[in-house]
Image (cartoon, helix red, strand yellow):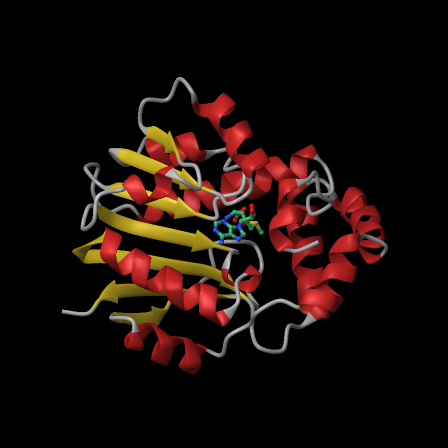
Amino acid sequence: MNWRDFWNRENPIYVNERHRALHYDRIARGIADLVEAPGWSVLDHGSGEALSADLVARRCALLYLFDAAPNVQAKQRVRFENNQKIIVLTNESQSAIPDGSLDMIVANSLLQYLSHQEFEGLLDVWRAKLKPEGKLVLADILPTRPDALADVLALLHFAWQGGFFFAACAGLVATWFSDYRQLRASLGLTGYAESDLRVLLSAHGFEGTRAPKNLGHNQSRMMIVARVKG
Ligand SMILES: C[S@@+](CC[C@H](N)C(=O)[O-])C[C@H]1O[C@@H](n2cnc3c(N)ncnc32)[C@H](O)[C@@H]1O
């Protein structure tokens, strides 16, 4: 099994429905705040189910959702079939986004599941799809040496505030015995140092700056806002 197979199945990442809903709500509000004008076209790459994508769509003209997992795509199609501003992409149709047409691309919690080579390939695709003044937002980026304790504490803090603390405690135990942990041990997750990431972005035509806050609840992870280099 690889990460794509993992995300194509039901998975234990969210400890309950409340966690799932609060997570997607927070991410959608964060992305919506990054939209600078109502006419923007936005791509959420590696979007997951994007339960609250309608909050983003309200702030822009067009929102493309792309997730590599076909089962995730199928759920998105059902959820957003009546929302004219949301286009759910498939593996085939993602190339139909016209070059130079996007104002912003967001990839939240995606880079850790990509090899360096996959990521570099995507940077070139994204650069082609963005307008010259376009913005690339990479968020929830793991450091090179992830801090498991910081991850646990961040989840418990989020859970305490969100009213699912005891479910989160049970979820942490379940994760310990889950195939997520086994996969993480066998496949690993890709992390980046800020300086290395900026060099990589520059090599692919972007200039990146670290944002003061991450989109998600875990502030030990990094968010980078990059612009196409002039
Ligand atoms: C941790 S989830 C993040 C989902 C969402 N961005 C969020 O913040 O909640 C990672 C998602 O990336 C998707 N994914 C993994 N590799 C991908 C790729 N190469 N292209 C697009 N999506 C990918 C997975 O299917 C999964 O839904």
Any part of residue 229 in sight: yes
Looking at the rendering, in which quadrant would you find the C terminus?
bottom left
212 to the left or right of 71? left
Q: Residue furthest front?
A: 92
Residue 188 to residue 96: above or below: below
166 to the left or right of 222? right
Residue drawn at x 40%, y 40% is 92
Residue 84 to residue 51: above or below: above
Nearer to the camera, 96 or 225: 96
Residue 164 to residue 193: above or below: above
Residue drawn at x 27%, y 42% is 97
Q: Position of residue 95 (x, y in %)?
A: 32, 44
Residue drawn at x 43%, y 37% is 90
Nearer to the camera, 137 or 149: 137
Q: Position of residue 121 (x, y in %)?
A: 38, 64
Q: Position of residue 214 (x, y in %)?
A: 47, 60
Looking at the rendering, in which quadrant would you find the N terminus?
bottom right
**Image quadrant where residue 181 sits:** bottom right
Residue drawn at x 33%, y 36% is 63
149 to the left or right of 139? right
How many marks are shown on the rendered structure? 0
Q: Position of residue 170 (x, y in %)?
A: 84, 47
Any part of residue 212 in sight: no
